[in-house]
Image: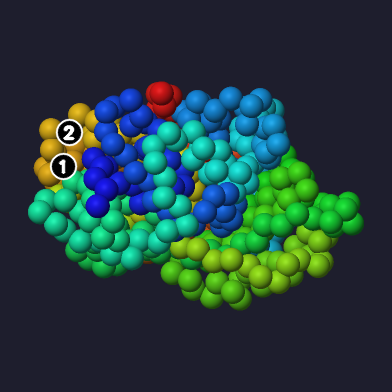
């Protein structure tokens, strides 16, 4: 049996950020993931300058051999309507490929890593947690996304009415012919909201790589909406006509409507495992990184790993992201005041799509970054 102070299940941005932040704390850390790295990860894939600053990423260094696509504009519309395009006049975000980004973050971690190893068992043994009858620690951290096995220990909360977003997308490298005919521009991601406002689709070009997808609340007619969107984009010439046939699916919880507990005795959840994706956009990378930093500060100072001690992390999450909604109203992306006949008009407004949709909901420019990881 191998003994550690903290075992992190999940080596994505949340898990790797937590492990790196705890370096130098004196804690013995182990990070486990079911996949080997680099690995494919279904995600549209963009990060704001705030995330890069918080992670202490040198852009010049990162861009060597990796995709770092500057984003200066957004093309936003409601399906069936003409879109509007806003130029922010500066770089407001960066397109990344998750296979590169996640591997880069994990490579910075000095703690032992066990990859390509699924968690098959988690048992409580004398105040410790034992994983796969091989590793043991008093604290386990769930960082393995929506279906994280550590999150399953805590359940979905008292109500069981969480809003789950299901998405399907594809990312592939275009052939020279596809790249030449594709009208989507790398510096201008496209966001297209469903007419019933229960989801949105995107077209995002990163150099010669193209990412296309659609996410909707509760998997409601997801494939039907995706097929219609893809066909409309093909018909308009925005994307190549010969796309890969296989779209990959994934799911996540939205922060305002998630009921999943964050802590228990010897257990703590971060990132998508905790249901922290931004409610209006579904973006999860920044919440994953920030939750990991908040968790690391609590873990490093904790006298023990009881639920009462770890609750300081839950308090920090509430302070950072706000108190979760208690009425569990239906709907995920847009507030109720938008869900009126004026929604179509708002989506044709340059001011609304820039100041509200892009800068507030997707870029969170009004929220200052956390202090950089060390």
* Foreground of the two, 253 or 363: 253
User: Which quarter shows the C terminus?
Assistant: top left
Q: Residue at left 89%, top 56%?
A: 177
Left or right of residue 373, residue 198 in this image: right
Q: Give the left or right position of residue 42, taking residue 181 as reference.
A: left
Q: Is mark 1 on a helix, strand or loop?
A: loop
Image position of 120 with respect to 128: above or below? below
Residue drawn at 68 percent across, 38 percent down: 66
Proximity of marks 2 and 1: CB atoms separated by less than 8 Å: yes
Front-lying residue, 92 or 342: 92
Quadrant of residue 28 in the image? top left
Q: Residue 325 carries which label?
A: none
Q: Nearer the viewer, residue 327 or 125?
A: 125
Is the residue marked by circle 2 packed among few (<14), some (14-19), or many (20+) residues within 10 Å? Answer: few
Residue at 63 percent of width and 52 percent of height: 191
Q: Indicate the position of residue 134 as horizontal and vertical percent values.
A: 28, 56
Q: Where is residue 293 in the image (x, y as percent from the top left)?
A: 35, 34
The residue indicated by pointer 1 is: 305
Q: How far across and how far down the image is residue 41, in percent?
A: 55, 55
Q: Which mark is residue 302?
A: 2
């Amino acid at each position: 049996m191998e003994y550690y102070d903290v075992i992190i299940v999940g080596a994505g941005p949340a898990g790797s950020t937590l492990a790196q932040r705890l370096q130098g704390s004196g804690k013995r850390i182990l990070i486990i993931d079911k996949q080997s790295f680099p690995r494919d990860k279904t995600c549209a894939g963009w990060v704001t300058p705030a995330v890069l600053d918080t992670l202490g990423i040198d852009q010049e260094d990162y861009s060597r051999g990796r995709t770092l696509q500057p984003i200066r504009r957004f093309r936003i519309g409601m399906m069936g309507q003409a879109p509007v395009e806003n130029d922010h006049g500066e770089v407001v975000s960066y397109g990344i490929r998750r296979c590169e980004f996640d591997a880069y973050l994990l490579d910075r971690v000095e703690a032992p890593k066990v990859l390509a190893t699924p968690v098959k068992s988690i048992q409580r043994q004398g105040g410790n947690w034992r994983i796969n009858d091989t590793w043991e620690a008093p604290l386990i951290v769930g960082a393995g996304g929506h279906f994280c096995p550590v999150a399953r220990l805590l359940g979905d909360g008292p109500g069981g009415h969480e809003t789950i977003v299901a998405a399907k997308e594809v990312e592939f490298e275009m052939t020279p012919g596809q790249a030449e005919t594709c009208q989507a521009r790398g510096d201008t991601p496209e966001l297209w909201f469903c007419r019933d406002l229960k989801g949105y689709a995107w077209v995002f070009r990163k150099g010669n790589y193209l990412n296309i997808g659609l996410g909707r609340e509760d998997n409601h007619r997801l494939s039907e909406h995706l097929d219609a969107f893809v066909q409309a984009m093909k018909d308009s010439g925005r994307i190549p006509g010969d796309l890969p046939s296989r779209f990959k699916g994934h799911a996540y919880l939205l922060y305002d409507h998630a009921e999943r507990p964050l802590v228990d005795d010897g257990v703590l959840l971060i990132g998508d495992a905790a249901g922290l994706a931004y409610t209006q956009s579904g973006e999860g990378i920044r919440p994953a990184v920030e939750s990991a930093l908040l968790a690391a500060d609590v873990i490093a100072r904790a006298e023990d790993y009881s639920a009462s001690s770890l609750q300081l992390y839950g308090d920090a999450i509430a302070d950072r992201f706000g108190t979760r909604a208690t009425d569990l109203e239906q709907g995920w992306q847009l507030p109720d005041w938008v869900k009126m006949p004026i929604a179509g008009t708002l989506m044709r407004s340059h001011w609304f799509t820039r100041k509200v949709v892009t800068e507030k909901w997707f870029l969170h420019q009004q929220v200052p970054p956390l202090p950089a990881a060390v």
